[in-house]
Amino acid sequence: MNAPAPSTSMMSGDDFRESLRRYQPRVFLDGQQVASVVDERGFGPGINAIALTYDYALKPQYAPIMTALQHTSGKLVNRLSHINTSSGDLLNKLEAVRLVCQETGCAQRYLTHDALNAIGQVSARIDDAKGSTEHTARFLNYLHRVQDQDLTLGIAMTDAKGDRSKRPHEQANVDSYLHIVERNALHNGKRGIVISGTKAIVTGAPYMHELLVMPCRNMGREDADFAVCCAVPIDAPGITIIARPAGRPGEKVEHGAALFSRKYGQSTGVVMFDKVFVPYDSVFYAGEWEHSGHLTYSYATHHRHTCIGARAGFGDLLIGAGALMCEANGFDPARETHLREQMVELITITESFYACGVAASVYGKPDEHSQTFMPDAVFSNIGKLLLATKIYDMHRIAHYVSGGLIVTLPGPDEDHNPETGAKLSEVLRANPDVPYAQRIETARFIEDLTAGYQGGWYSVISLHGGGSPAAMKQEIYRNYPIGSKVELVERILERGVAHDPQRAITQNRQPGKCCDTGCTTPGQPVMVDLPAVEATLPSRRLH
């Protein structure tokens, strides 16, 4: 067997930063136009988070999980732009996302993966309906370019929506949904479409290479102009991005180690499209309204599955910080029942929703049109629902095991104030084996993750990112085989009721997760350990 061909351009984190200089997007931050995205301090933490996904792919210890062999090209590509072809791919993607989010909190680039997989599936579905190969061929050309150039893509999916009670074509302001304003337009010798409208929530918008435009809902025949899926460069003429800062980079630089959110964060942007031309070779569909629901469903399922890995990485941060805080306070959770119970609850929450991600991977099946793998919808949505609603409990537990010190500490500058610093280091030390500086640093780390700007941010994106809890509940009920459970009970009760396909509560049936085809080996996930930190411990344990 031949070794896989390397990607033509597997970038490093610094390469990613430099690649952003090739683009000149029109971006506004805090009321001012940004001259250079890569040099803008307000975006630094977000760029750092994505840069790590590039660096980890080049590290030998992480490469097995951060890279994958693209079956359509035979090339080795970044896992976060790979198309899944097995349950093993889904498991490895889940592990890769958890790995990068253990470091960054939210690595953002995984949305590229989720959208590419969904667009590949809908392209195959449209081709099957039309008896053609055109859409899949166009998608593969785009996919291979993205992988060869190692690009990161922003997902422009959620529209401004306007009046929520009205459909897209009924809106008073047509630009509240992105739509086609001209077909078969001619620009610089190329034919294409012209689009206008507003996408309201685009993760990492200012520092992407390109945007993938997708519909955010099922469309009707009257909404055909709003049913559009295409790719556009971030600096295409007619695009304006109004962004918020990533993390907390703008605050005064404090003494000592920087807080977490000064290093890693996430920007989002409102993206306005004003008569943006898109050549047909970057248009995946335009007007095929009957396929919008399938694309939205596919993306949501992939993304909710991925979010499980992302928030598990965040949970790992809270578990580690909580244990450190217990130690710094002079407690051993193994000996303190109330602290042990809290730590076990935090572990249980994190690993419960992650277990749903694992189950969704193992029970994943090939999409009937593209044959690429789709995570199980029920387990994906249950896992996402758990993390969305339990994020507040995760914060509560971190506060419980840490004590009130995390929000009552004097500011860091007081540690270096000759009038106060020495006394603070004496009275605020707890465990004699843990220096004051380490205890305070851990407390401020937890404050940053749970009780400040960044903590509120993580709560909101966990609750609403990838859809609201109501959307997850709808998908769970829609996909769960309640009919099989009903018929099970009726069989035990010997009612002799025949299956009625028109009966509402028994329409969704499933004989068993594996009973129809038999069990198969889903592929071996690659488990990657966290980096060793032993070498850093002696210098951190100074008394």
Image: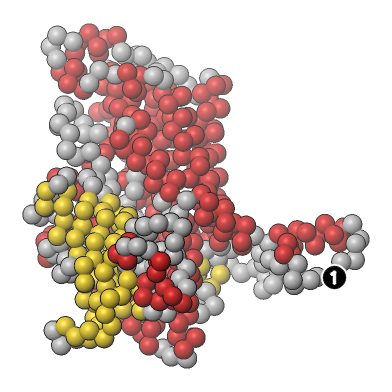
Q: Is residue 385 above or below residue 440?
A: below
Give the total of numbered labels.
Answer: 1
Which amino acid does the dot numbered 1 rest on?
A: Ala
- Tell me which residue sits at (89%, 57%) in the image: 493
Q: Is residue 222 above or below residue 103?
A: below
Instruction: Give the image quarter of residue 115.
Output: bottom left
Residue 73 is at least partly visible in this image: no
Label 1: state its secondary structure.
loop
* 396 up-or-down from 233: above or below: above
Relative image position of residue 218 (x, y in whole percent): 47, 68
**Residue at 27% in and 45% down:** 265
Q: Furthest-bottom residue in view?
A: 131
> Which residue has dot 1 on it?
498
Front residue of 293/74: it is 293
Q: Residue 107 in the image: state x and y as whole percent.
A: 32, 52
Q: Which x, y percent locates residue 308?
A: 46, 51
Q: Is residue 275 visible?
A: yes
Number of residues whose C-alpha sits closer than 10 Å to that of mark 1, classed few (under 14), some (14–19) or many (20 or more):
few
Q: In percent of the image, x 19 and y 85: which residue is there?
A: 186
Q: Residue furthest front?
A: 172
Residue drawn at (55%, 61%), measured in percent from left and top? 377
Q: Nearer the viewer, residue 534 or 42?
A: 42
417 vs 338, left or right, is left
Q: Dividing the image into 4 quarters, which one contains the N terminus?
A: bottom left
Question: Along the line of sight, which residue is nearer the eye, 98 or 490?
Answer: 490
In-image side of 501 versus 537 (left or right): right
**Quadrant into which the C terminus falls:** top left
- In the image, residue 445 lies at what x, y percent? 31, 31
The picture quadrant where one finds residue 376 is bottom right
Vertical arrangement, residue 411 with respect to residue 389, above or below? above
